[in-house]
Image: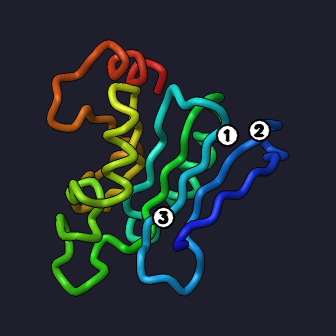
Amino acid sequence: MSQTLFRGFDSVSQRPFSLLRNNFGVAEAWGFYLKNGPPSWLIESPHPVADENTEDIALEIWRRIPHSMLMVAGAHRQAGGPGGNQGLADVPWNSGSMFNKVAEHYMPRPQLQVHGFTNSTAPDKDIVLASGSAPAKQLHIDLADAF
C-alpha cells in the first residue's frame, strides 16, 4: 500500500482529523488529504514548494474552516523534467492525478486553491482572487469584499 490513514486531534483548530498521506519511499507522489468530517469546502495547495509557503497558508485556512478538506499535491509542479508546467506533475491540469480525482469527487463544493505569484506576474498585488475559467459567483464577490 502506498498510502497510510492517520487519525488524530489538531491542537490549533481543536478538532479531530483524518489524514491520508503517501508512505515514504514509494513511487507515487499523491500528496496528502486532511479532513475533519464530511467536507463542505476544499482548500488546495496544488504547487507546494514551487509556490512558496502555499502549503502553510492552505493549512491555516483549513484550520479556520470547520468541515473542510486540505489537499496538498505530492510533487513539485515540474517533477519529471524541465518545462513541467501543465504536465503530469502539475496536478490541476492532469485529469488522471489523484489530486484532480479527489477534487472532482467533491464537486460542486467550493474549492479554494492557494497559489503563489511573483512580482513579474502580479506586480504590487498581495492577493489574487479568481474564479478560474468560470464566471465569478456571489461567493467570489463576497470573498473579494471581505479582503
Name the disc covering residue 31, or none.
Answer: 3
To which residue does mark 2 refer? 13
- Indicate the secondary structure of the residue bearing disc 3: loop
* Residue at the top extreme, as displayed: 138
**Tag 2 near tag 1, CB within 8 Å:** yes
To which residue does mark 1 refer? 63
Position of 62 with respect to 115 (left or right) is right
Q: Image quadrant of residue 108?
A: top left
Residue drawn at point x = 78 percent, y = 36 percent? 15
Q: Position of residue 36 (x, y in %)?
A: 67, 37
Position of 42 with respect to 130 (left or right) is right
In this view of the protein, which residue sits in the foreground, 102 or 117?
102
Instruction: Tell me the crowding category of disc 3: few under 14, some 14 to 19, or many 20 or more residues within 10 angstroms, Cα based.
Output: many
Q: Position of residue 118 (x, y in %)?
A: 31, 62
Q: Would you place residue 142 above or below residue 88 in this image? A: above
Q: Identify residue type, mark 2.
A: Ser
Residue drawn at point x = 27 percent, y = 17 percent? 137
Residue drawn at point x = 54 percent, y = 46 percent? 70
Disc nearest the viewer among 2 and 3: 3
In this view of the protein, which residue sits in the foreground, 14 or 104?
104
Q: Image quadrant of residue 62?
A: top right
In this view of the protein, which residue sits in the foreground, 73 or 2?
2
* N-terminal-most mark, 2 or 1: 2
Instruction: Tell me the crowding category of disc 2: few under 14, some 14 to 19, or many 20 or more residues within 10 angstroms, Cα based.
Output: some
Q: Identify residue type, mark 3.
A: Gly
Q: Give the CA separation, mark 2 to mark 1.
A: 5 Å
Q: Position of residue 85 (x, y in %)?
A: 19, 69
Q: Identify residue type, mark 1.
A: Arg
